[in-house]
Amino acid sequence: MSTSEESKPRVGLWHTPEVAHAVNTGRQVVVDDFTRNLDRHAHDFRYGLFCPDGSPSPLAEPSPHIDVWPRSAATSPEVEIGAWHDAQFDAALAFAVRAERARHYPITLTHHSVSYVSLLQARVLPMLLHKPRPYDAIVCTSGPARRAVARILGHVAETLRQAHGLDLKYEGQLITIPLGIDTERFQPRDKTKARRDVGIDEDAEVLVWMGRLSAIDKADLMPVVGALAELRKRHPKLRLICCGRQHRGERFGDVLKSYAESRGIGDAVEIRTDVGDELPLLYAAADLFVAPVDNVQETFGLSPVEAMACGVPQVVADWDGYRDTVVHEQTGVLIPTLWADAQADVERGSLTSDPAYDHLALSQSVAVDMAAFVRVVDELLNSPDKRAAMAEASRMRAQMLFGWPSVIAAHELMWKQLSELAAKDTVPLTNVTGLHRFPYASVFRHYPSHWLPNDAPLTITEQGRDLIQRQAGQLPLPLLARFKYLELSVLQRILVGLTKMADKDKTLSLDHIFQVVAKGIEDTPENRARMNRHVMWLIKYGYCKRA
């Protein structure tokens, strides 16, 4: 590695893999793609990726730009951090680590969905308690999302002011940077060949929807099926292909298919739930991409941008981030949406309800103008020249704004500018790390019958002597090997020390053991605790005892 590479400031990245689902969420895919493309397009910074033990890194192979570290290294003074970025908005942890380090550097957080009530207490409230600085930022994926985030921050701050008289107004920045896509994977292709490869008739007129198949937390596609029935009168070979995995327990694809059959167009609606590597081909096979999104769970929307990169015109709802990504009458068309005061009961019930079904209740009161949808789709299907112009404009826009080189460059410019602000700050950081560390000793000290003092005499047992004579071959190792919270060599040194002292009719205390076994290790509460844990494990398994 060159000296210039070593001298670059380092951005710490906290990696939280999705473990709750067999299939990664779109959020997790975006986060992992972001990390991999930092590796490909890094220019002004180096990166340190903090991964949980036993978790696979999103990097396929070692990187010259990204070091992979255990999470314990996040607070190590030996690890230099010039900025901290959390791509999943884990605000509390980021600010707690900075307070522990007592160093001024920017913290940036990327939001995803902002419609869950848990966001208020689990993300925003802890962040405000740490009092973000003007060189901290929330990365908003679109202009509409930025306005929503600003209102959320204001709501939580005002609630705290009214209830507790706290002045915790957000002082950081809101910076708009879109999500990125791979414009090499998603690119224009020969439509005839693409259709042949994915089994679509060459003379069909094709609409493609790509996204989670769920009316609960994505989009109600039933009105589109109704619109399709109207459009088939003028376009008898028109087909709607709905691609994406289904929401667990909902089976919305089956519902769509059944509804299409009831409207007499069952043959015109196809559900594909496992598209995998065929996704770019399905985009390329489409005449139009359609997305009548009506759900507050959406903030950006990757699929319209993927279709854009493939040179496919987009017919989408004028809703949330879509109005940032899709340029009306240039790359596609924004279909008007209508809402009314239909939220108060859902807001009141959100204290105890399932957020996903709150999203469903809200979305069922959002109307996408299907008459306009029918007119626009009809016009575009009859205007190949207009579609071609939109396709060209789409590809150009996707490459300029949403390709990973542009998105990574925007992040690095942000970190550079914020770092310059942070360098000027001399005010001590707000430290509320006590809210992120559980005080086990003080809370549970009364649980045991007795507490072992640091000067209590300890000696080897016969079982311990027998173990030493067998060279520690009988230690119960499965838990030690799996969780790595104890070191075999330390256990052995303690047993040898106790044996030698017992041969002289002497004992060792916790204090003595630390002095002998941990020779050369700094005497800190943390290092003492680690050593004492080894001793207590030996007592637990009967290898030593209180004399």
Image: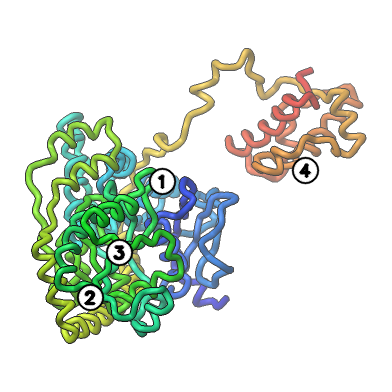
Q: Earlier in the sequence, mark 1 or mark 3?
A: 1
The spot of residue 279 in percent (x, y) is: 39, 69
Give the crowd class for mark 1: few <14, some 14-19, many >=20 residues within 10 Å. some
The correct choice, above or below, for 275 with respect to 76 in the image is below
Reading the image, the residue beneath label 2 is: 313
- Amino acid beneath label 4: Ser
The first of marks 1 and 4 along the sequence is 1
Disc 1, SS: helix
Going from N to C along the chain, the mark reached first, 4 or 3, is 3
Q: Is residue 443 above or below residue 116?
A: above
476 is higher (above) or lower (below) than 457: below
Nearer the observer, 205 or 76: 205
What's the amino acid at mark 1?
A: Leu
- Label 4, on which residue? 489
Closer to the camera in the image, 387 or 145: 387
For marks 4 and 2, give the CA distance. Answer: 64 Å
Query: Which residue matches tag 1?
Result: 93
| Residue type for callout 3 | Asp
Q: CA distance from mark 3 to mark 2?
A: 24 Å
Q: How far is the residue under mark 1 from the one under mark 3? A: 52 Å
> Residue at (24%, 53%) from the top-left corner?
262
Instruction: Indicate the colouring scheme.
Output: rainbow
Q: Quadrant of the C terminus?
A: top right
Which tag, 1 or 2, sits closer to the chain's start? 1
The residue identified by callout 3 is 267
Mark 4 surroundings: few (<14), some (14-19) or many (≥20) residues within 10 A: few
